[in-house]
Amino acid sequence: MISSIRKQQRGRFRLWLSAPVIYLMIIPLAFLDACLWLYQGVCFPLYGIPAVPRKQYIRDSRKRLGYLSRFDRLNCWYCSYANGLINYAREVTARTERFWCPIKQQFEQRFFAPAHHKSFVEQGDVSGLASVLSDRPQKDGVQDTAH
């Protein structure tokens, strides 16, 4: 259904021309997924950072839609996976940034500050930074002196 409408709107040639470029992205996406699994599995427990539940970010509820063709369902799965993975990666890196460097970026035009920066301290607020860092739970009785 969706692919048929797109073929009518854009033409079959354009879709076939772009398909290899689009679908080859599965390689770096799968590699990113594996790297995030390894990174989070090794580093987060060492620093006491709560794990990001992957299943809350990557899911495909459109597979049950009977009016989609197999090709449409494949496309929907691909987009669900890619967008969910990027959101998952964003949360993993946000938790990492909160742990290592909870300082806001300097405001500049055309900079889209991530939502998690709202809880970060302003640049130059040394006492605020010290307060945020001292609130962290210490793992195995070792004081966090990194950064």
Image (cartoon, rainbow, N blue to C red):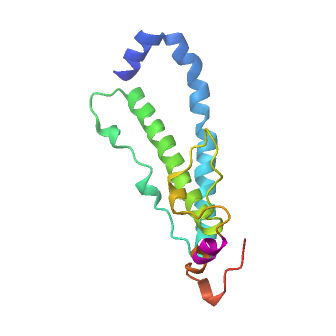
Looking at the image, residue 103 sits to the left or right of residue 88; the answer is right
Quarter of the picture holding the N terminus: top left
Residue at the image position 61 percent from the left and 62 percent from the top: 122
127 vs 93, nearest the viewer:
127
Residue at the image position 56 percent from the left and 78 percent from the top: 136
Q: Is residue 42 magenta?
A: no
Residue 131 on image: x %, y %: 58, 77
Residue at the image position 56 percent from the left and 52 percent from the top: 89
Number of numbered labels in the structure image: 0
Residue 9 on image: x %, y %: 42, 11
Dividing the picture into quadrants, the one containing residue 29 is top right
Looking at the image, residue 10 sits to the left or right of residue 30; the answer is left
Residue 91 on image: x %, y %: 52, 56
Residue 15 on image: x %, y %: 52, 17
Magenta region, mostly helix, strand or loop?
A: helix
Looking at the image, residue 82 sits to the left or right of residue 71; the answer is right
Dividing the picture into quadrants, the one containing residue 49 is bottom right
In the image, is residue 10 above or below residue 109?
above
Residue at the image position 28 percent from the left and 34 percent from the top: 65
In the image, is residue 51 above or below residue 21?
below
- Residue at far left of view: 66
Dividing the picture into quadrants, the one containing residue 143 is bottom right
In the image, is residue 54 above or below residue 86?
below
Quarter of the picture holding the C terminus: bottom right
121 vs 23, nearest the viewer:
121
Q: Which residues are magenta?
A: 126-131
